[in-house]
Image (tube, rainbow, N blue to C red):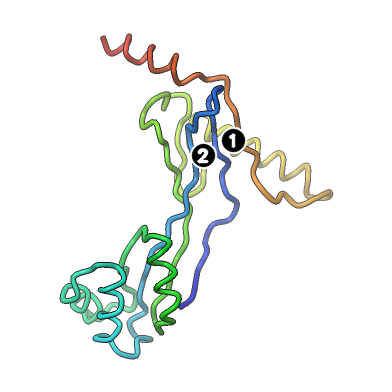
């Protein structure tokens, strides 16, 4: 089993002024098969079906369709990841990616903005990218940027919740 990591630099966690998480990056692991590298489709299906609680008949049909790369499962648990790695199945690979999660849903979304594929596209998420870029330029000659700095905003989600309810009414 190989493990591919396409993530470049992890995004920091963003907090409100009371240290409640507003935006957090979570690791997401997916499983895919390179069908030409599978030694035995039936045995691979049996093992993956048991570990991932998948319908074995559907999985076998997916793998036999002739595609070179087949996504088997997305966002698997750590236990499932460990179990798959321990089996060392030829042709089965894990891909790790980072997914941005907003625990409070759309609350203060107009300020927080959003990110996609590790790029801030609006609001604080966009500003954070500009901040990181300038910080990287400043530290290139000095020290490599090892970990992101978390952001603590002056935003208060309790007050934001009250304002959201007032606007809704």
Q: What is the quadrant of residue 53 in the picture?
A: bottom left
Residue drawn at 21 percent across, 79 percent down: 60
Camera-side residue of 101 and 18: 18
Mark 1 and mark 2 residues within 8 Å of each other at the beta carbon: yes
* Residue 63 in the figure: left or right of residue 36: left
Q: Secondary structure at mark 1?
A: helix
Above or below, 86 relative to 53: below
* Residue 149 in the figure: left or right of residue 22: right
**N-term-proximal mark, 1 vs 2:** 2
Q: Which mark is residue 22?
A: none
Residue drawn at 50 percent across, 71 percent down: 3
Q: How far is disc 1 from disc 2 in space, using C-alphas? A: 7 Å
Q: Which mark is residue 128?
A: 1
User: Seen from this angle, which residue lies furthest right?
Assistant: 142
Camera-side residue of 129 and 80: 80
* Residue 98 in the figure: left or right of residue 45: right
Above or below, 155 relative to 58: above
User: Seen from this angle, which residue lies furthest bottom?
Assistant: 39
- Across and down, in percent, residue 162 comes to 38, 12
Q: Quadrant of the N terminus?
A: bottom left
- Across and down, in percent, residue 73 comes to 31, 65
- Across and down, in percent, residue 91 comes to 39, 82
Circle 2: is it few (<14), some (14-19), or many (20+) Cα within 10 Å?
some
| Residue indicated by mark 2 | 120
Q: How many marks?
A: 2
Above or below, 98 relative to 155: below
Residue drawn at 43 percent across, 56 percent down: 28
């Amino acid at each position: 089993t190989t493990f591919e990591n396409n993530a470049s630099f992890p995004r920091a966690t963003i907090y409100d002024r009371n240290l409640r998480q507003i935006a957090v990056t979570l690791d997401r692991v997916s499983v895919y098969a390179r069908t030409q590298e599978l030694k035995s489709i039936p045995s691979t299906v049996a093992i993956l079906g048991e570990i991932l609680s998948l319908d074995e008949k559907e999985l076998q049909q997916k793998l036999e369709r002739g595609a070179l790369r087949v996504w088997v499962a997305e966002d698997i648990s750590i236990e499932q990841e460990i179990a798959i790695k321990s089996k060392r199945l030829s042709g089965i690979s894990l891909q790790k990616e980072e997914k941005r999660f907003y625990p409070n849903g759309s609350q203060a979304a107009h300020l927080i903005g959003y990110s996609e594929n590790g790029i801030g596209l609006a609001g604080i998420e966009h500003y954070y990218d500009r901040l990181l870029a300038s910080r990287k330029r400043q530290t290139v000659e000095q020290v490599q940027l090892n970990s992101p700095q978390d952001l603590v905003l002056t935003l208060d989600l309790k007050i934001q919740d009250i304002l959201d309810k007032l606007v809704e009414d």
